[in-house]
Image: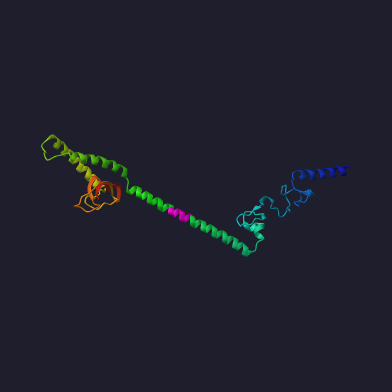
Amino acid sequence: MNLKKNNKNKNKTKDELNKSCNCSDECECGCNEGKECTCHDENCGCTEDNCNCENENNCDDCGSEEESSCSGSCSGCSGCGSMDSDTMIQILGSRNQELEEKYMRLQAEFLNFKTRTQGEISRMLQYEGEDFIKEILTIKDNLERAVMMDDNDLTDDVSKFLSGIKMILGNLTSVLDKFEVKEIDCLGLEFNPNVAEAVLTDQDETKPTNVVLEVLTKGYKYKDKVIRHAMVKVNK
């Protein structure tokens, strides 16, 4: 009776061990023999000494589409291991060339972006204050129109008042010169559409064709850039 009881306990121990194991009947990890399971994998088909069921994946690094058992490097992958050395060298060489070409393209794109950005920043700094200068030029135009109202009689009140405006205009012109703002000289010269805009035409037989007869509104350059075209009358 005691022997029968011992056999029952032995069978119970085996059942308890198998209860915690998800292996199939073909699993050789030892659980079917009443030993402790070492893999605990529901699709385990490994042996106890060589169980890689937790590391199965596709080896993307080497390009193999075979099911592999990588354990962190391609050297332990069943897909790579089935290739000969020449094929492996060819695959890795192709991959290396692809990465080098990608790196070179990215480097070229970055250099182009860097050059373009530096050029834009340089132009912004070179012509800094351009919009402000254009507004100042409008004030200068009005001061010049006021000065043109003066006549030869310098004793009247208007002339005395305009003398102060002349001083202000002179100071403003000096400031603009300091910041490299120059008037465009085009009176009596051949019309140049790059620096002037023809708004009127006239005919003067004593002067050559296509020369500027009159400057209606002065043009200006800021350093080497035309910031305002001159409005002129051209001889036709």
Q: Is 46 in front, or is 228?
A: 228
| Residue under the point 32% across and 49% down | 126
Residue 174 at x, y = what percent? 22, 45
Task: Please state which of residues 234 and 175 is positioned toward the viewer in this rendering.
Answer: 234
Residue 212's place in the image compared with 166, above or below, is: below
Q: Nearer the viewer, residue 114 or 234?
A: 234
Residue beneath the point at 53% across and 57% down: 99
Q: Residue furthest right?
A: 1
Q: Nearer the viewer, residue 96 or 202?
A: 202
Q: For residue 68, which quarter of the picture?
A: bottom right
Residue at image coords 61%, 62% = 88
Question: Residue 216 at x, y = what percent?
Answer: 24, 44
Q: Quadrant of the N terminus?
A: top right
Count of number-bearing discs: 0
| Quadrant of res 18 | top right
Residue 59 occupies which quadrant of the picture?
Answer: bottom right
Q: Where 158 sits versus 21, above or below?
A: above
Residue 55, x across and y down, in percent: 66, 51
**Left or right: 31 in relation to 111:** right
Image color mode: rainbow
Tell me, yes or no, whether the highlighted magenta stretch contains residue 2.
no
Span colored in magenta:
106-112
Identify the residue shown where x is 87% and y is 43%.
4
